Amino acid sequence: MHKVVRDFSKTVVVPPEGIRLAYEPEPKVRSKYRQEIEEVLITKGCLQARVEGLAKEIKEAFADINEITCLVVLKGGMFFAADLIRILDENSKLRTRLDFIRCSSYGDRASSSGEVTMYEFGDMEGDNILLIEDIIDSGKTLEELQSYLKSKGKQFKTCVLLDKGVAKHIKVDFIGFRIPRIFVGGYGLDYAGMFRGLPEIVVIKKELLK
Ligand code: 5GP
Ligand code: MG
């Protein structure tokens, strides 16, 4: 049975059985993905609720600033960022710019190769940056990204949707959910290019991962 969560004002700790809102039914895996997906970990309603909570935290942290550049880490952070930025821009005095960075280490596998490649798009000279990332596992990717931005003298805060609680050495300003150390997909996150379009966070079956 999924745990019912009511407070989305701070990082939500997700148990292995998953979470849902009080009014959401017990979530089921879509039949077309039953071979590949073990269970729904975080429902659409919980994602929405926590993204709103995060937007509130971010607005408070940037209370004395008028404009931020949201630097989205492609591709996984795309859906999360799209939801978050629209709430930020709708309900605050903050003006937002949007930019992207590509940073890849996983390829088609489920564990990091340890090497991180970076591709930058726009120029963010002098901007207040909000770095938006989908997930931290070992912390390697975020560590590289943060030191890359630091080396360019950028001021930034970091926001991640999911944290597996492993990378204790990395400073993250805003964390959506703390999840168990399992491989997840959905809401922008993929496995070998699949599952990004799912509106919830799901657990990928272990036997699928290589
Ligand atoms: P790290 O460098 O922290 O070990 O891993 C970070 C990157 O690996 C994330 O940006 C993400 O792209 C990918 N990653 C880590 N864990 C998962 C996971 O459970 N599911 C998916 N789809 N990607 C993950
Ligand atoms: Mg990523």
Image (cartoon, rainbow, N blue to C red):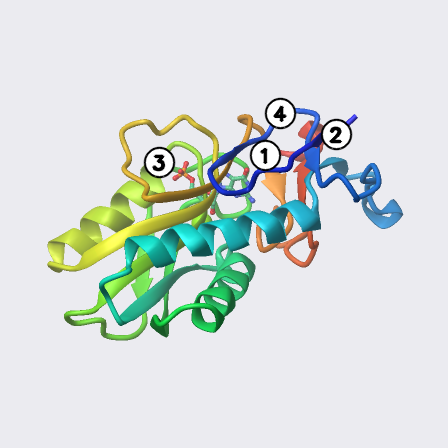
Image quarter (top left, top right, bottom left or bottom right) of the C terminus:
top right
Query: Three-letter amino acid code at disc 2?
Result: His
Q: Earlier in the sequence, mark 4 or mark 3?
A: 4
Q: Quadrant of residue 6?
A: top right
How far apart, in angstroms, are the residues tagged by discs 4 and 3?
A: 21 Å
Q: Which numbered disc, 2 or 3, marks the residue closer to the eye? A: 2
Q: Which of marks 4 and 1 is nearer the N terminus?
A: 4
Q: Which numbered disc, 1 or 2, marks the residue closer to the eye? A: 2
Query: Three-letter amino acid code at disc 1?
Result: Phe
Q: Which residue in the structure is indicated by mark 1?
A: 183
Residue 162 visible: yes
Q: Is mark 3 on a helix, strand or loop?
A: loop
Q: Which residue in the structure is indicated by mark 4?
A: 15
Ligand 1 is within 8 Å of the C-beta of the residue at disc 1: yes
Q: In this view, does 162 lie above or below 2?
A: below
Residue 49 horizontal/vertical position (percent): 60, 50
Crowd tier of the residue under label 1, counting other residues whose Cα lies within 10 Å: few below 14, some 14–19, many 20 or above: some
